[in-house]
Image (cartoon, coloured by chain):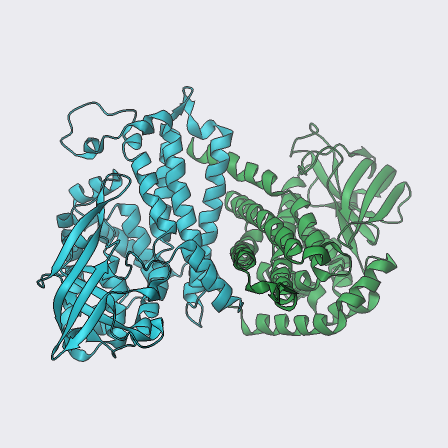
Chain colours: A cyan, B green
Amino acid sequence: MDLNYTPEQDAFRQEVRQFLENNLPDDIRERVQKRHRPTKDMIARWQKILYKQGWGASNWPEQYGGTGWDEVQQLIFEEECAMAGAPRQLDFGLRMVAPVIMKFGNQEQKDRHLPGIVSGEVWWSQGYSEPGAGSDLASLRTTAKREGDHYIVNGQKTWTTLGQHGDWIFCLVRTNMDVKSQEGISFLLIDMKSPGIDVKPIIMLDGEHEINDVFFENVKVPVENLVGEEDKGWTYAKYLLGHERTGLANVGQWKAMMRRLKEIAREEKDDGRPIIENPRFRDRLAQLDAELRALELTVLRVLTASSGPGPEASILKIRGTEIGQRLFELAMEATGQDALAHIPEALEPDYAYPVVGTMNATSAAGDYFNMRKLSIFGGSNEIQRNIISKLVLGL
Amino acid sequence: MNFELTEEQNMLQDSLRRFLANEYTFEKRRKIVESGKGTDETIWNALAEMGLLAFTFPEEYDGLGGNGIDTMIVMESFGRALVTEPYLATVVLAGGLVRDAGSDAQKQDILPAIASGQKLMALAAYEQGARYNPANVQTTAKADGDSYTLNGRKTAVIHGGQAHQLVVSARTSGDTRSEDGITLFLVDADASGLTINDFASHDGFRTADVELKDVKVSADAIVGELDKGFPALEKAIDQGIAALCAEAVGAMEAMTGATLEYTQQRKQFGVSISRFQVLQHAMADMFIQTQQGRSMAILAAAYADSDDLDARREAISQAKLLIGQGARLVGQSGVQLHGGMGVTDEMFAAHLFKRLTLINLLFGDADHHLGKVSDALLDKIA
């Protein structure tokens, strides 16, 4: 047992840090560090830069154009990217559909879809949840009916993050009504330019357009877009969720946010003194700092286990999202009543009016509101506790 | 970065757990606790034979050259079985102090005797009213030619009544709360003027209050340097905290396991109560806290030997903080989920709960350690 990084891992960290210093464009870094949403162009530009370096897919094996890095290297990479102010890479292609295509897709699907994901040219969306199928995902009702060489898809998907930019969407659809709900589901890849698809925005409580409803009306999908076998989609869906959960611990992002929160605690004033001097506030920060450290160690423990990550990954989702939410809660509370103002334009570089309070306050409450999603998406934290009860504790 | 145990460590863990499962059953433990002796000769000799008492001592003093991770493995196994033997007091605290700060003669004299199981020791560091601050020392040691005369009272001396020899912190100079001016003395249990008031603690362990009235010791009883005993004392306490963290993780794991088993057996409304989601989520939270605790026990073990003081203090306090809180949640939930049985002496869970509760109170509770990391944070970023 050794908690130190090896000299090779330290050298790797230096290499990543140097690369970020030389290659992360200033406009992107500034925007991310201000906690302003990166634009589509920025995310695409950054993905292209990483792709050219050969680092487009840190979690993929080399044979598909990935880096082939081990778990610890991936974590180091994510942490350095977050600390440097790089935008988050898009999970939907890289961490969700790609592992499924690699494991269950055919050669043609791999050749067709993986290159566009790693280069960032093709944006993917996730078509899992439906208005009537959230935590009970298997009750989904979007149907795909085989007609000749095509499936005809009808139904609605919801909470589709960045669906407004999506080129393709991977969907769970019902192909068999006569069997138990989990047994009649298939995994389809659908071109979002297909006729009959309609994407409608859902505005979140922070006023932002991040998620969407996606409607399917007699959408024709070629049968070659079926991944694996018909009616076996639930197995692939669960495999994907397992991958998603591990990533949801978000340690690198939260470490960057913790560093920022400590700066905020020094900058924001409480009766004329830095809020860090207020023992009630500081204790909560110190508590969170300890919990984040425990999360980091637990992630390393789970990911480096020789048996590979199992259903314990649910712990990481629960703890990661709880800690993330509290980081933003404390950041908001640090700014006090300055967080009241809702002036999203103040984050724009050309905003000419005085800001309310410090820049820390501009995104504070909005971020806090937005982050309530963390304990809800990717399988709500209550569902994660069900998973632990059932699959880990055997109840 | 590697969290795997070595082959030897795996063997140590397996054999110790097997030994405890066979020889340290709940019933056997109950008899040992009821004897009031605070230690069982057969068990202690067996631990000595397994090499456990020598594990973390250097090879030249009959030790095996182990480290904090080895202590973690031992203490975690003890936690699962609620072993009440004086391992923490003798091997980790007093033995560790002599190993790290003692003279060659002291090490020769003491470490092999501990390793063979012949010598029990205890650390008398805390005082009434000082609560968790080991630098708050009112016990005095006055130089008198070539000897010292000690006067004062020590409290919460774990296994003090069983020890053949104590390590006592006393003030040789400086103000009451000053870290400077603290000296550590070896004091034989039969020294004249020394009164050891041995009592049972709620968790089945033995603890003692110690009174020193004109106790005379010679200058070669000083462990480490005159006036400069505090850093060694703090390090020994930090190693004790790391050991307790590991013990707590073992007890938390045992509590989670006992609760899973009980709720599956217990039937109400015609089904096992483990079928109820409200109980399932409580058990999931116990599991999460135990896993988080395990991560922090590893952190504490890894830093317990460190001489990077700031890093060690941070790691130790973060670990004790989260483990203190986790022990509370797991202990209370375990009792709650056992229902009425949980508050009976009959159930192992009740004993796990008591030990988990008292571990939080030893060497600084969660609030104390939160205060320490919180103040360190202020120094770091203000």
Q: Position of residue B357 (x, y in %)?
A: 68, 49
Q: Nearer the viewer, residue A158 or A60?
A: A158
Whether residue B44 is visible to the viewer of this picture, yes or no, is no
Residue located at (82% from left, 57% from top): B38
Q: For the image shown, how many numbered marks are present on the structure? A: 0
Q: Name the side, left or right, on which A84 lies relative to B286.
A: left
Q: Looking at the image, is B229 positioned above or below residue A75?
A: above
In the rendered image, residue A340, in percent from the top left (x then y), is placed at 32, 28
Q: Quadrant of residue B348?
A: bottom right
Q: Which residue lies furthest to the right in this view?
A: B192
Q: Toward the viewer: B36 or A313?
A: A313
Horizontal side of A111 relative to B4 (left or right) equals left
- Tell me the quarter of the image containing the C terminus of chain B: top left
x, y percentage for residue A312? 46, 64
Residue A171: quadrant of the picture: bottom left
Q: Where is residue A391 drawn, in percent x and y?
A: 48, 68
